[in-house]
Image (cartoon, rainbow, N blue to C red):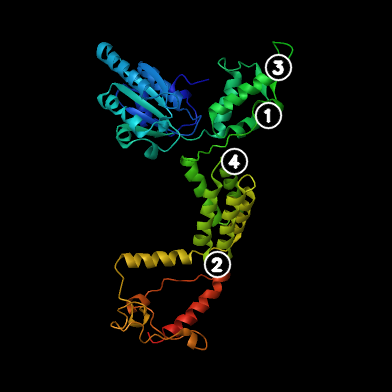
Amino acid sequence: MRPTRLDEVVGQPKALSNGSALRRLVETDRPKSNSVILWGPPGTGKTSIANLIASEKAVNFVQLSAITAGVKEVREAIESAKTDLGLYQRQTVLFLDEIHRFSKSQQDTLLPAVEAGWVVLIAATTENPSFSVISPLLSRSLVVQLEPISREAVAAVIRATLEDNRGFAGQAELSVEAFDTILSWSAGDLRRALTILEAAAASAFEKITDATEIVSIDQEDVVASTSRSANRYDRVGDQHYDIISAFIKSVRGSDVDAALHYLARMIDGGEDPRFIARRLIILAAEDVGLADPTALTLAVACAEAVALIGMPEGRIPLSEATIYLALAPKSNSAYLAINEALADVASGLTPAVPGGMRSTEISTAAAKASGQGYKYPHDDPITVLQQSYADDSVLAKSYFKPKAVGRESSFVDLWAKLKGIIRKSL
């Protein structure tokens, strides 16, 4: 069912729209030396598009995978391409799958061939090329991002596969439940959808006695053919960053169900549970903050528990901390306060420490009259008294702005009263 022309490629309306750079590259002979980096999840058409570029241009097509090929195989392909171009004026398309698996030095071996136009490089990657492909190759290539195939597009291909002569030619049918399961389990990966369909059909075929009988594929056949759905998660790629971002934003936004969904995807994908726990500690301090100070204690306890018991039991304290933090009142006042103070210090607000606040423990204390005039708060009945703890330029600032949220609401009036006593002369 691999497409034989560009219009048969499904699920990529943006990348293959009329006038798009990729469509122009496939359908015209200009420019012949354009290299392309196809970036997208598995099963979105990267290999199919590479084949189409080669077939439309009537060129040699050499396919290598960075998983199995090394520098030796790449150099051999380049030398062969150089010979074909010099002797027969025939261009070579070098399709390098999983280019992110190549190290920087391995990717460097491609540069001379790309620069000289000996090969048209089409590289495929599931990771963001900005991080996984060296800058010289990026600057010489057209980067095309492919999206996960929509549920509707996968459904259309499944229906076509059942009827098309390249597929089952009308000799197989799917139950509604089996159809829906394939759509759900493929998770936007068209190749996986067709793989499950083929395996399910093989399971169903074993049950028929008449070779001319139409094969009925039901839910039992689909379940027998594959044990689980595809959880698209890469611990070092875009999914790592996208899902932890969605997780943190869901907790911050108090959506418990969304947060647990992303937590489950990370756990199922093999994410380091200590990484998740660390992010929860940061969130407890940054986003819950003083609205519920016990949140930080619970997050730290969660991290310690995960480190002690490991997985799979570690999922339980991770779930507990996630639920608690999602439901907790939120305040970022502590986060904003230190950032504002740091920004002022960085911009030059570093006045001398007032004499009374200076240390009396250093050898030059007496000469500097350090500590003179300092009033000891514990000598005051309420342990708070009027005193200048910093230069006036600092005291004119207001870094801590408590929010009337959760436990922090009690700090609104408290800080106002304390400041009134401490700075009453200002």
Residue at (39, 17) in percent of width and height = 55
Which residue was labeled with disc 4?
A: 268
Mark-to-mark CA distance, 2 and 1: 48 Å
Q: Residue 150: give x, y in percent of width and height.
A: 53, 34
Crowding at mark 4 (Cα within 10 Å: few <14, some 14-19, many 20+): few
Alpha carbons under labels 1 and 4: distance apart:
19 Å
Q: Amino acid at mark 4?
A: Asp
Three-letter residue code for mark 1: Val
Q: Amino acid at mark 2?
A: Ala
Residue 263, horizontal then vertical, whole percent: 58, 47
In 3D space, how far apart are the residues under numbered discs 3 and 2 (Cα atoms)?
Answer: 62 Å
Dot 4 or dot 3: first in sequence order is 3
Q: Along the line of sight, which residue is nearer the eye, 170 or 409?
A: 409
Q: Nearer the viewer, residue 359 or 399?
A: 359
Asked if 375 appears above or below 258 in the picture, the reply is below
Mark 2 Cα-neighbour bin, 10 Å: few <14, some 14–19, many ≥20: many
Q: Which residue is mark 2?
A: 291
Point out which mark residue 223 bears: 1
Q: Residues within 10 Å of mark 1 (few under 14, many from 20)?
A: some
Q: Earlier in the sequence, mark 3 or mark 2?
A: 3
Distance of label 4 from label 2 (alpha carbons): 32 Å
Residue 397 in picture, x, y percent from top left: 37, 74
Q: Which residue is mark 3?
A: 206
Disc 1 and disc 4 in contact, CB within 8 angstroms: no
